[in-house]
Image: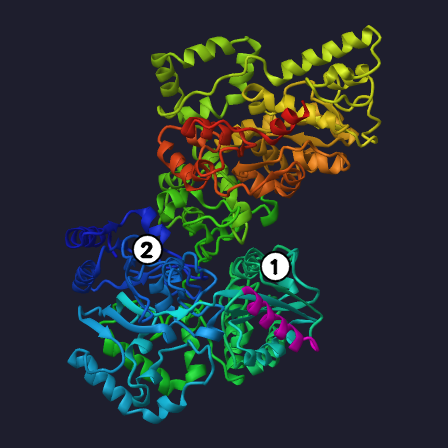
Amino acid sequence: MAEHEADELEQALSGAVRGDVSFDAASRALMTMDASNYRRVPTGVVAPRDADDVAAALAVCRDRGVPVVARGAGTSIAGQATGLGVVLDFTRHMRSIRSLDPEARTAVVQPGVILDELRTAAGAHGLTFGPDPSTHSRCTLGGMIGNNSCGSHSVAWGTTADNVHALDVLSYGGERVRAAQGVDTLPARLRDGMRSLAGDHLALLRTGFPELPRRISGYALDELLPEKNADVARALTGSEGTLGVLTEATVRLVEAPAARALAVLGYPDESAAAEAAHTLLPYGPLTVEGMAADLVVGASGLPKGGAWLFVEVGGAGREEAYARAEEIARAAAHATTDHTVVADPAGQRALWRVREDASGTATRMPDGSEAWPGWEDCAVPPARLGAYLRDFRALLNQHGLRGTPYGHFGDGCIHVRIDFDLMREAGVRVFRDFSTDLADLVVTHGGSLSGEHGDGLARAELLPRMYGDEMVGLFHRFKDLWDPAGGLNPGVLARPRRLDQDLRFDVLPRRPVDVEFGYPHDGGDFSAAVRRCVGVAKCRNESVSGASVMCPSYRATGEEQHSTRGRARLLHEMLAGEVVRDGWRSEEVRDALDLCLSCKGCRSDCPVGVDMATYKAEFLHHHYEGRVRPASHYAMGWLPVWLRAASFLRAAPVANAAAGVGFLSTLAKRAGGIAPERDIPELAREPFTRWWRERVREAAREAGRGAGSAAGLAAPGAAAAGGTAARGAAAATDDPGAGVGAGADGRTVVLWPDTFTNHLSPSVGRSAVAVLEAAGLRVVVPPKPVCCGLTWVSTGQLDRARAVMRRTLDVMAPALDAGLPVVGLEPSCTAALRTDLPELLGDDDPRAARLADSVTTFAQALEDYAPDWQPPKVDRPVVGQTHCHQHAVLGDAADRRLRERAGLTGELSGGCCGLAGNFGFEAGHYDVSVACAEDQLLPAVRNADENAEVLADGFSCRTQLDQLANQPARHLAEVLAERLR
């Protein structure tokens, strides 16, 4: 569309609808892709407020011949949520549950309602919506109806079509249609056309559709048969937005079991599991899911085997559910290698998480190579699943491809990601040849090309192989009846585009772009790193489950551009250069990344390991290269330098006093790009390293007076470490590896004096020394200033970060040579040493990997090097938040065990505190920072027992609690050290 035509369309839509009309590059870029291999660029995006808005938007587009695509959460895997023309985004406004009738077991919902919201509302009445795709936390009812989604519980409750009562839709021509059973209430044109289509082809409609539980492909024209009372609602379900635009739906609800239990059955291999699945159906399970070992490498809690079936059952109580699960396990025992039965809800959630994340984890093969959808959900009769999988594996081998099948074994529906090479023409040809061969194979086994996600752009071209030309001709007739102008989602289902057109990889650069980080898991290719995001949108979860973090900025704003997926999409379009045209200078990408907290939550919580914090640092480096940066980059990016200078000048008292003077504080914050709502943290009068040096000098003096122990090295009240004070002094001041004998004693650790501990929270460092020495460890500290480079990394000043890191490696060389462990206290700095340092220095300096490998957390050091030490008993409940970098990079299992041993009971919340280093201090970020804190941390602290110990190992977390809740919090080392005394 010409630019002037797009401008005129935008103006017309803005005048016609009350919702949001967005034709800017960023809004369009966010809608170019869904969770498939496909990409189509829309002209604009409209977020309607109600059905009248939808009608108005359709009228404007119809008058100009502009196509329209309805879109939910964009998690479709076949490409049907991409499209040209105008995208109707239903996730912003049309997302209310209009009514819920527990007696009739129905609910009336708008298309943008998230499935989990409906399930929560229904759950208050002991009901649920049966279909539950793995994307249940973010997929919408409109998208589910468009695709006829199923999920893992279709064994018990069927597909979405089985749970739809009536649909209110608008045709492209402007007709308002109430679709239910029967055609009498339809407009005359549609009523007569439907009767003619069905009446003229009764035999074909009765014999032309395979009988299987997961037949999703094509239009469900058999639902128009008179014996089915012409169920128009079911016929429209699964039509992928090609016939009408849904504005409201009446759906059926089912009774939810009071309790559930999960039997996980191990089998020797995938074929054995597949052949056993259908034999378990007579026991009435809620679901029978399957996966093989090549998908769950490293997963814990699974019984012995090479493949598993997840069989869930319900009951009136936990005991009944457990007994039913045990019955199934016993019945299957002759074929299983092992089994486990779990009735505990938390244990079940942990196991289900392995399955639900498979759609993301399957995008990487065990060797790290990429794998893609395309044949994500074909289905065969359940009894033929074992034979089909054997033939499927053989076909993969024939084409030189690899894949990891998993999915709904009880329904004969298989998900798989395959390592197609979609970046090169030869690979695309293999993709096409394999697709046609597999379509024939599925048909040979009596199956459906799609068993859950619809045909979309991926398989619609192959429908003649499944249905024959005559039936496909009826599909075209059905499309023309409802949408004679062809304005709704053209190229999908009827008269489809080729399956190898519109691939999202076509626009990407074929050579790696020059970047600073090494991207070791993506072969050094930034484009491959960005391609990690396949659009499953776990980052769009609107609530935190367990200890998860991702994505705090999205939960704060609800804006797609502030989700991990949205940012990845914009980076993809930046590399493509078609919609986002300014490359590294793009303001659209900069604005989207501006609210990224660099929490690294996506690094662990995203099923495919997208690391947006690293991508943000990379982008900022190039974006500001050779240009003046924001003031905050100089103020907070160079924070270690300013704090070191203040320490050298002994300026802490003056700086603290000035920060308390209103106009001086205001000037300082304005000059430094600091949010005016923030208080400037107080500098420590005595940094940790000055305290340490004085302690060492005192120890040396004691040694000179003939003291034979290292008591002078201990913090007040702490037990002394073994060894002489002279040796301790030498190690602390001259060489971290001195006198250690290459670290062979296993009792010496290097305590990392990070910037925040050193200059802002030295009590944490002093407490850590006390605890480590009480545990019998010998503590040494680097003799010169060291820094992980985090503040320069987070602001994208990567050249400076690299220089700082190299200088740090020079200082740490003796400790590395001695093989000493390095104990970090500040999680963000410890995580930077573990990941940012080796990924930024890459292969340039092998010492980077050695330092990263030597880094350990405070709790892990105690566990590894003082395993017999018993911490003091605190015996108090705890509240607080696991630091996001600890969660994402370092892990907190050792911390949990240490807290348990110390009698600190309870769980820390997930999410992110919202301060996140420089983020929450930067001007313009305050409101989002507060919203992130209000998501989990602040409510948890407010609702805690008055005797609870508030734990926060990160300086940012403690500062956020202090400034927003006037609540002091402490590092775990401080809590333990207090009890030592």
- Residue 246 placement: quadrant: bottom left
Image location (x, y in percent) of residue 276: 62, 78
Q: Which residue is mark 2?
A: 91
Q: Which residue is mark 1?
A: 365
User: Which structural element holds mark 2?
Assistant: loop
In the foreground, 694 or 952: 952
Type of residue at label 2?
Thr
Picture quarter with the N terminus:
bottom left
Vertical arrangement, residue 189 with respect to residue 820, above or below: below
CA neighbours of label 2 inside 10 A, class few (<14), some (14 to 19), many (20+): many
Residue at point 37%, 73% (across, down): 163
Residue at point 51%, 42% (across, down): 909
- The reply to whether dot 2 and dot 1 touch (C-beta < 8 Å) is no
Q: CA distance from mark 2 to mark 1?
A: 33 Å
Q: Is residue 972 magenta?
A: no
In this picture, which residue range is highlighted in magenta? 318-335
